[in-house]
């Protein structure tokens, strides 16, 4: 019995490598559109689906989780599974999920009533880190230094709210720092009209964030964070230096690949959480508390593929090191095929 996959194709996504991998290895597949109203009938002749949906796609934010849960009712294997992605780009969901399994999460505080939020602000110690539930690369993250600032944010949160995404020209200094040569600069300019258009669509279709407010405790003296990405039985790790004169590391572009310098406690925690949540792939951001113990700030099923590939190797869940560059798309596809084969006996 042969295996057939369905792949949702989106330019610039993991689907490009998934398609090439299938072509190179003789794996039967077909292209589908996961936004098609007739999707369920199109999946009747496949064993699994690969769909790399992201936070800045309005359609995905509206329906990806619900579509995936429905597909799983057809007894199909899907990447990402519901367990892997239902909490993606939702920091409040991650708070309750990680607290439920007693994972070491930076103390986090969510409020859905303005008066309760104001009461907490009155007795809280500052600074705190304000976050919207959505956003990546340190978007929608702000250091709140005083109660007055927190109250002002609270007033906005329970009135007009906040834009879910920033404009294209937001954070231009960080974007400029990531340009290393003229070729990259020209590519950035070439893609700018399309990126501006995509940004305007996001602002138009993604709802304003209001009716809640979310803070995390501020853990000082962290000059970098540690990103651990678990794919199946592989853990990839690197450090990210903070942005200049900033407490945020996510999106800085300053990555340090030094396997010997990775805190192995972060790897062990990541494997433990993945085992409890039964996720296929998950990235963790760690910083240290005042006792120098690792604490999770956020998790995400999405990440930059090249950042993972550039890791010199990975650890398995027995903490054995494997020296090898691995494309995350390949690891995800291979794991899905193994899951399908185990289920069907192929």
Image (spheres, rainbow, N blue to C red):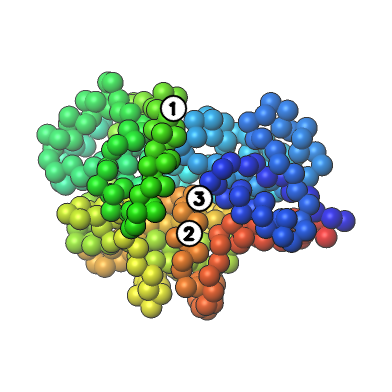
Residue 306's disc number: 2
Q: CA distance from mark 1 to mark 2?
A: 26 Å
Graded by Cα atoms within 10 Å as few (under 14), some (14 to 19) or many (20 or more), the crowding at tag 1 reads: some
Q: Secondary structure at mark 1?
A: helix
Q: Position of residue 210 (x, y in %)?
A: 33, 26
Residue at the spot of label 1: 201
Q: CA distance from mark 2 to mark 3?
A: 15 Å
Q: Secondary structure at mark 3?
A: loop
Q: Position of residue 246 (x, y in %)?
A: 20, 52
- Location of residue 122 (image quadrant): top left
Q: Nearer the viewer, mark 2 or mark 3?
A: 2
Q: Which badge, 1 or 3, comes first in the chain's sequence? A: 1
Residue at the spot of label 3: 301
Q: Residue at x 36, y 33 (%)?
A: 165
- Location of residue 152 (image quadrant): top left
In this picture, residue 121 sits left or right of residue 37? left
Q: CA distance from mark 1 to mark 3?
A: 23 Å
Q: Residue at x 61, y 62 (%)?
A: 331
Q: Position of residue 199 (x, y in %)?
A: 40, 32
Cβ atoms under marks 1 and 3 closer than 8 Å? no
Q: Secondary structure at mark 2?
A: helix
Q: Which badge, 1 or 2, comes first in the chain's sequence? A: 1
Residue 28 visible at all = yes
Q: Which badge, 2 or 3, comes first in the chain's sequence? A: 3
């Amino acid at each position: 019995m042969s295996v057939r996959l369905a792949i949702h194709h989106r330019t610039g996504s993991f689907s490009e490598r998934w398609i090439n991998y299938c072509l190179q290895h003789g794996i039967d597949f077909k292209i589908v559109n996961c936004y098609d109203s007739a999707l369920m009938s199109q999946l009747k002749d496949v064993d699994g689906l690969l769909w790399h949906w992201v936070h800045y796609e309005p359609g995905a934010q509206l329906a990806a989780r619900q579509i995936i849960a429905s597909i799983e009712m057809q007894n199909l294997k899907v990447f990402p599974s519901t367990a892997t992605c239902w909490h993606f780009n939702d920091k409040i969901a991650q708070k309750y999920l990680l607290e439920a399994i007693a994972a070491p999460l930076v103390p986090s505080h969510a409020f859905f009533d303005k008066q309760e939020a104001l009461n907490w602000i009155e007795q809280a110690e500052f600074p705190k880190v304000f976050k919207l539930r959505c956003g990546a690369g340190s978007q929608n993250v702000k250091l709140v230094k005083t109660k007055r600032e927190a109250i002002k944010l609270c007033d906005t949160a329970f009135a007009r709210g906040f834009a879910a995404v920033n404009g294209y020209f937001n954070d231009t200094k960080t974007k400029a720092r990531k340009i290393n040569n003229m070729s990259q600069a020209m590519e950035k300019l070439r893609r700018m009209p399309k990126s501006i258009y995509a940004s305007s669509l996001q602002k138009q279709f993604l709802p304003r964030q209001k009716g809640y407010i979310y803070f995390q405790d501020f853990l000082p003296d962290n000059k970098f964070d540690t990103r651990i990405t678990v794919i199946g039985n592989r853990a990839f790790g690197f450090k990210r230096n903070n942005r200049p004169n900033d407490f945020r590391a996510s999106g800085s572009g300053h990555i340090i690949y030094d396997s010997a310098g990775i805190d192995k406690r972060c790897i062990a925690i990541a494997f433990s959480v993945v085992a409890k949540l039964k996720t296929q792939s998950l990235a963790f951001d760690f910083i240290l508390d005042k006792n120098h113990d690792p604490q999770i700030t956020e998790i995400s099923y999405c990440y930059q593929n090249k950042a993972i590939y550039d890791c010199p190797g990975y650890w398995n869940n027995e903490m054995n090191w494997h020296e090898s560059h691995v494309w995350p798309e390949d690891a995800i596809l291979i794991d899905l095929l193994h899951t399908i084969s185990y289920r069907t006996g192929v």
